[in-house]
Amino acid sequence: MANITKKVSWSSRGDESGAAGEETPLLNGSEQSRPLRQQDSARGRPKEIPHNEKLLSLKFESLDYDNIENQLFLEEERRMSFVAFRCLEISRWVICGLIGFLTGLIACFIDIAVEQLAGLKYRLIKENIVKFTEAGGLSISLLLWVALNSFCVMWGSIIVAFIEPIAAGSGIPQIKCFLNGVKVPRVVRLKTLVVKVVGVIFSVVGGLAVGKEGPMIHSGAVLAAGVSQGRSTSLKKDFKIFEYFRRDTEKRDFVSAGAAAGVSAAFGAPVGGVLFSLEEGASFWNQMLTWRIFFASMISTFTLNFFLSIYHNKPGELSNPGLINFGRFESEAMEYNLYEIPLFIAMGAIGGGLGAFFNFLNYWLTIFRIRYVHRPCLQVMEAMLVAAVTATVAFIMIYFSTDCQPLGPDHTEEYPLQLFCADGEYNSMATAFFNTPERSVRSLFHNPTGTYNSLTLGLFTLTYFFLACWTYGLAVSAGVFIPSLLIGAAWGRLCGILLASTTSTASMWADPGKYALIGAAAQLGGIVRMTLSLTVIMVEATGNVTYGLPIMLVLMTAKIVGDYFQEGLYDLHIKLGSVPFLHWEAPATSHWLTAREVMSSPVTCLNRIEKVGTIVDTLSNTSTNHNGFPVVVQVSGDDEPAKLCGLILRSQLIVLLKHKVFVELARSRLTQRKLQLKDFRDAYPRFPPIQSIHVSQDERECMMDLTEFMNPTPYTVPQDTSLPRVFKLFRALGLRHLVVVDDDNRVVGLVTRKDLARYHVGKHGLEELHLAQT
Amino acid sequence: MANITKKVSWSSRGDESGAAGEETPLLNGSEQSRPLRQQDSARGRPKEIPHNEKLLSLKFESLDYDNIENQLFLEEERRMSFVAFRCLEISRWVICGLIGFLTGLIACFIDIAVEQLAGLKYRLIKENIVKFTEAGGLSISLLLWVALNSFCVMWGSIIVAFIEPIAAGSGIPQIKCFLNGVKVPRVVRLKTLVVKVVGVIFSVVGGLAVGKEGPMIHSGAVLAAGVSQGRSTSLKKDFKIFEYFRRDTEKRDFVSAGAAAGVSAAFGAPVGGVLFSLEEGASFWNQMLTWRIFFASMISTFTLNFFLSIYHNKPGELSNPGLINFGRFESEAMEYNLYEIPLFIAMGAIGGGLGAFFNFLNYWLTIFRIRYVHRPCLQVMEAMLVAAVTATVAFIMIYFSTDCQPLGPDHTEEYPLQLFCADGEYNSMATAFFNTPERSVRSLFHNPTGTYNSLTLGLFTLTYFFLACWTYGLAVSAGVFIPSLLIGAAWGRLCGILLASTTSTASMWADPGKYALIGAAAQLGGIVRMTLSLTVIMVEATGNVTYGLPIMLVLMTAKIVGDYFQEGLYDLHIKLGSVPFLHWEAPATSHWLTAREVMSSPVTCLNRIEKVGTIVDTLSNTSTNHNGFPVVVQVSGDDEPAKLCGLILRSQLIVLLKHKVFVELARSRLTQRKLQLKDFRDAYPRFPPIQSIHVSQDERECMMDLTEFMNPTPYTVPQDTSLPRVFKLFRALGLRHLVVVDDDNRVVGLVTRKDLARYHVGKHGLEELHLAQT
């Protein structure tokens, strides 16, 4: 793929390693650390950096799933009684409950807000259309529709583009990265949550081809990251609770629970939520964690269900477990037969192909956007354009549709449009377009045979496919699940109708809703390529396990066919972000690589008792920007190289410098408070940059004793370890730094995430991605 | 708990470590390695060894989930092309498909055999009862019933007790251990499978309070272990396929798939199967593996469904996804309301309490059996006794029951007994007792209100509870799932009836079947203490997700309440087997322990080029029986201790000795074939004992070069590493040996499974189990 320029919106400061080997010269560090978007407005021109998908950005930091077991930590743990550990365990359950509850509330808020606002909009437009249908002048209605949509989308896009660009899209790729161990900047902040929630309401009300489900996953994750820390840095409010959980290990566990709660609230699928978290995130799970995740999921769907039942004036009737409700599939009506299975598999293949095509189009669109549509104002304008076009296309489709259906006595259509149909009839195309996408999906699944004719469905599929593809990647907060389901349900139902018309035993194929469901699964699977979790989500959303096997077969087929052409949508976007994402296993043919070839070297090491000046200089060195430093100790004389005795992080050094933990000061001021774990926790996770810490010339001559603070037992590997073995260790333990040592335990290199992520299997065997400072 | 003596039926040869520290003097090694049961018959008296549950047996070997990346392996991997890896991946899928298919077939076989034989039995007895009801002399019917039951159970028990004792019970504890990484001897052999399958048919037909579901999990696992190796050692048949998979890593993955396929076939719960495998087994999973497991599960339930549909003369109608079928719960009838949730939770608590009581009774019963009922003939007699008592109790209950119900026109009872009821009526107690347990469960779930009166249900619960408790642990192949469900369904239905009678709004509580379901979940959860997987299994078996939340709440409550009193049944039996089972995490308060305290030392090390005599002596040393040996190299002179350069296993050394890979021979016979990985794979997994290998006195003076064969990059930790850190590394990577080194990379100790498993949290904080050679 061609080299392109990219406005980096995922970027962050510093690479992981303490090694100074292969880095290319870099820009001024302090400038680099500011979000580039701010530079845009400052200079009026975006910073464009040569960039392509074969690059791996060095700007992403890793999360540290490995506890820093330094002396302070061990002392604290050893002081803790068994009861204290029990209390911690209970707090974890309480937090998970809270996460579930709040996620459910947010889902509830989104649902009610969308329903109210969209209802208002559709009623307004409907009245207008009714008024002008007879009188002529429907173009005024069109204008009204376009104006309302664009207006909503404009606000949704403005807050995303100008306030928090990371809130764009569904947030699922970002959460995947976070769970994978990549610290995506600003992704779990309160501001992001607010923009996400408000943004998704505007997008859905604005009539874009988007869903409100995907963003729930991101919302749940943000909530989890916030609640579990017992404070909000944005609001400058510290509740002084849950301080024990202020580290990456714990935070990441809670974020898994949050993501699961999000899925659960979105689809009413608690088990699917757990599986989503496991499938997308955790390589290291354990039973207790899984149960907590499950608990959060259950509470989340229950909260949503409960509050929606009150909202619908049927308190206690728990029939709305999720934001999207596939409606009740009656078992008898939905039986399938053995000979239908090949048909389902064929539909899976179609879904996989269409999904790959969708991803392919979206891939190029994204590259186009990276290259040309990088200014916030342009992004807002594009979003408004899409909103206008969506409304126009919908209007035209409805206008020219001749598919009139009788309005049943118990019609389920919320806003039936009569338009040019006879009295007592309504326009069938309008049920698909003139509705929130969730309702459209439901009517495709459940409306009786004959509600839609083939032409309506065909045209709808075609237009909605391209609209959805254009929409995904706009600077609005929006999900791709529902549009995918909608496209799939439309062509699936079409398949059902066509099958029924070609076979004589029409009664066998009586229910096109069944095919709509299979089509929806196929299309969604073809786009996002999840299997196990998606199967369970679909089954839970339909509320009927009868369809487990066909849905699973369809999703598998869709994935196999889709993967043949193109990666999944989320993976594609992760790749375009140049994120050092670690897959499950090292590339198959990488056994000939060893740690020696993979590692970064030489490594910047620190002595156990090190001069403050050296530390400050090392940290300030913007050409390296290292985050982890092996600590070494000189054993016998100067001739022998130093031996590894620990590992210390940039963040720890900064806290030490800030508190001036110098050997000389400790001697002079005996009363000085000893540094505690609390000081590190208070600074977590936004450690100040080194530039903000003032160290006087005198202090530079002081010494710092790192013994207490470094991790004395970092994981190490010998130089000859094969890449798959290094990879397995790194991935299974969620490491950030892995020290490579020689036979005498001397540091020879350091392996970080980027060193492992850059190898991947390409068309010509093992390929190596280039590293870039973007 | 008191010291008890135990006939070790799980025992195995050799402990893991190469360390010779704290072992107690041992019996003669070669005798030790023979199954103790054979000694019994040989000497006429069982070998009794002091033993209690606070012991940890050294007799269990570990599986090695860590690939031995020696030079041979790396050379092979490096020679392999990308296409070859693709082919391997495809083989894995094919194997999983086969596992699923065969598991489904076996389930089908069991189902049909049980149905036919049990049908025959019940028809015979029914005719007899009908004959004697009027005429008097029902005692003859009782005798017939007792005789038939005892006869069946006798055969079922004989094959288990005399041929393969490991096939007793459900096999789930054994599979849990296997997935945890403990090599339980003979657990995945063909003979075990045959005995298991035939045994379970006899047990169920023999009318014991057992289910045929649990054994399916074991059967699936055995199948998986067999199919994936492409050969059967028992049948001495090597198909020369899948040779690449002949190592612990791959085998264990397939066994996970087999266990999942078993669950899937048993309960028609493919997702539940996957979760069972994950929850009980894999701490290290990955996406591809999970999908393969899911695939095997799907194929398994589908195969069963398909063949049963043919058997039932309705080919293609896929309505029998599992061995147990809860029947169709209609959504409308089964709605629950918010205020019922506290009731459900209360039922969960009851289930937890009853489950703990069940486990408590079974625990003491098991200890009694270990002490007094260890001879096979006694075991057979006990099993026959239980069968006779079960039949007698059932008969008496039915005889004295006055609960007559009218026989509906479309009665679902298979074998309705009229007995002393009026014409057109049948004995209600008989539907619960005179039936296979699966049918009884279904009738408790679905029979209309009023089918059972409270007294019937109460008496049934009481008797069945004790019968089931007595039955579990007999030397028969049998599962505990169905009896648990049955007990729970009975008292659950009772709760429903009582609730309906105490409230005025009787219509609200109209359906006691709902409470039967909740009770069943509560009782099962209280006994086995699974949560996530069991929730999904129950939901899939009911075919209705509406009950997801209540079932989950019930299972959680049952677990919390149950855990307060007593461990789960499977964990209890694992503990009684003194298995070094590794839990998910190190005990919470174990941070003050370091590798130095935990490890075994001193360690028996081998030189890289070692004298054959030394190796033979080391391996023959029955007082240590080590399985892994660090390989060291002397660097500079004799004064400095040797440095670690690799790790070699007993099994590898034995293959080397067998092939006489001596340096001298290689020099003299240049044409000698170089040893290949194939030679190791051919010997896997039943490596010959060292005693069977003849090494002449001349050969003892030869040297062996271990460089090519040892794992050159074993995982190591420094001495100061805390126990939780060691534990995490060990568990996450599924290690068998972890070398502890000092700052200069010299071996100071070795950590094996038993070193980690012996620490556990007891009543008085951290406790240490004793190690024993039993």
Image (cartoon, coloured by chain):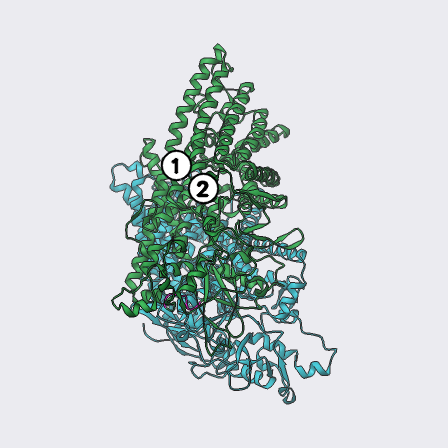
Chain colours: A green, B cyan
In the image, is residue A636 above or below residue A86? below
Task: Determine crowd level at label 1: few under 14, some 14-19, many 20+ residues with C-alpha closer than 10 A.
Answer: many
Q: Name the amino acid, label 1.
A: Asn
Q: Which residue is mark 1?
A: A320
In the image, is residue B245 above or below residue B494? below
Q: x, y percentage for residue A25?
A: 55, 54
Which is the main secondary structure of the residues drawn in magenta?
Answer: loop
For numbered disc 2, what is the local secondary structure? Answer: helix
Q: CA distance from mark 1 to mark 2?
A: 43 Å
Quadrant where the image shows the N terminus of chain A: top right
Q: x, y percentage for residue A34?
A: 44, 47
For numbered disc 1, what is the local secondary structure? Answer: loop
Q: Name the amino acid, label 2.
A: Gln
Residue A709 among magenta residues: yes
CB atoms of marks 1 and 2 within 8 Å? no
Residue reaching furthest to the right? B671
Residue A582 among magenta residues: no
Q: Is residue A173 left or right of residue A675?
A: right
Subunit under mark 2: A
Foreground pick, A589 / A578: A578
Q: Which residue is mark 2?
A: A38
Write the start and end of the magenta stretch as one range: A708-713
Name the mark on residue A603. Answer: none
Q: x, y percentage for residue A348?
A: 59, 40
In the image, is residue A517 above or below residue B61? above
* Residue at x 48% of width, y 80% of height: B603
Subunit under mark 1: A
Q: Earlier in the sequence, mark 1 or mark 2?
A: 2
Badge 1 and badge 2 both on one subunit: yes
